[in-house]
Amino acid sequence: MESYTWGYIHKNPKQTKRLLGVNYEQLEQLIALGKQINQKNREEIEKTKIRINQPGSGTHPKLSQEEQIVLMLVYLRHNISFQLLGLIFQVSESTAHNIFTYWQKLLAEELPPSLLEQVKKCQEEESLLEHLTDYELIVDSAEQAIERPSDYQEQKQYYSGKQKRHTRKSQFIILPKAEDIIDVVIGKPGPMSDIKICRQTLNKFKTKQTFSGDKAYIGESQITTPYKKPRKGKLTENQIQENKVLSSNRIFVEHLIRVIKIFKVVQERFRLHKNRYKSVLLTVCGLVRLRIGSLILEIIESAKSGEIIDVKMSHSFMPKLDLVTSNTD
């Protein structure tokens, strides 16, 4: 029996983006990729099994693969409880949790959360890093509330005096105009300074790579930052104008962080186990790249039967580089 949510999406494809965070076409691509990964995963598991019963015997899942992927996206987009998620899809709370966990981990391994991660699979990292030096990348961080750790020392480590709660911090380095996520660092303790996180990241880039940041990054030579008002003094008119230009260029990183927080599992207090934090947020970053069009999934169909035979992954930034990867390789 088809779930109401899946049926509603079919009848109202224009509502898909509001419900799931990606549009209908991207959902179809994601489902095709998910099915392909799942099939490959099942084949690997089957090789290790010692079977008594024939393949295909036993209890069949209540939800189709399409519905299971939609369930996972609903959780990421709306951050509702698994009890409510189970009611929506007419399965038990534990089944909803197991379905989400399975597909989230599966897609986290395949959806590259950043351009650097995607290029690693294609062995074109050195060429990309050289191309990036033509751009002034934008860097910024965002904090998210987490459940209060039970261990006292861990509480001290994650308590952010600025936010007045326990938080984790993530750093995003993006292209100008938020065309893509170049690099992402997930799950640092909230009190850790932005500039310290950034300095731990700079070794990924060329020494001549330039960045743009806010006042939190003052003191790092590779990062252009706004002029800080001197104590008991004033900024000159030129400094004020330069700050405005810098702010107008940097605003795009705020826009991209807002898009990431459309998935409420990132915006609201993180309720899953702390060991899942990095994996879940990297999955969201991969979905955001798909949403903004920087990560491209192409479905390859058979000319004779029309069946999906492959899903290819590519990127829109550098067509000259061979960044196309096949999921079947």
Image (cartoon, rainbow, N blue to C red):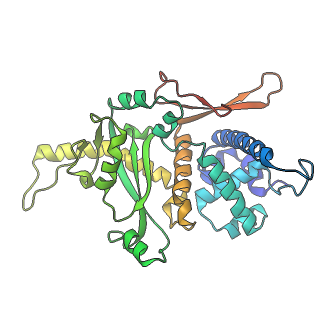
Position of residue 297 in the picture relative to residue 238 (left or right): right
Could you say where residue 69 lies in the image, as x and y percent from the top left? 70, 50
Whether residue 41 is visible, yes or no, is yes
Which image quarter is the N terminus in?
Answer: bottom right
Residue that lies at the very extreme toward the left in this rendered image: 232
- Tally of numbered tags: 0
Could you say where residue 50 lies in the image, as x and y percent from the top left? 85, 50
Identify which residue, 302 or 241, lies in the foreground.
302
Position of residue 38 in the picture relative to residue 62 (left or right): left
Q: Residue at x 49, y 34 (%)?
A: 119
The correct choice, above or below, for 181 with respect to 259 in the image is above
Identify which residue, 225 or 123, lies in the foreground.
123
Q: Residue at x 80, y 50 (%)?
A: 64
Q: Residue at x 11, y 51 (%)?
A: 235
The correct choice, above or below, for 224 with respect to 264 in the image is above
Position of residue 13 in the picture relative to residue 114 (left or right): right
Q: Residue at x 30, y 55 (%)?
A: 196
Could you say where residue 290 lies in the image, as x and y percent from the top left? 56, 41
Q: Quadrant of residue 121?
A: top right
Which image quarter is the C terminus in?
Answer: top right
Q: Quadrant of residue 159?
A: bottom left
Whether residue 294 is visible, yes or no, is no
Could you say where residue 68 lies in the image, as x and y percent from the top left? 73, 53
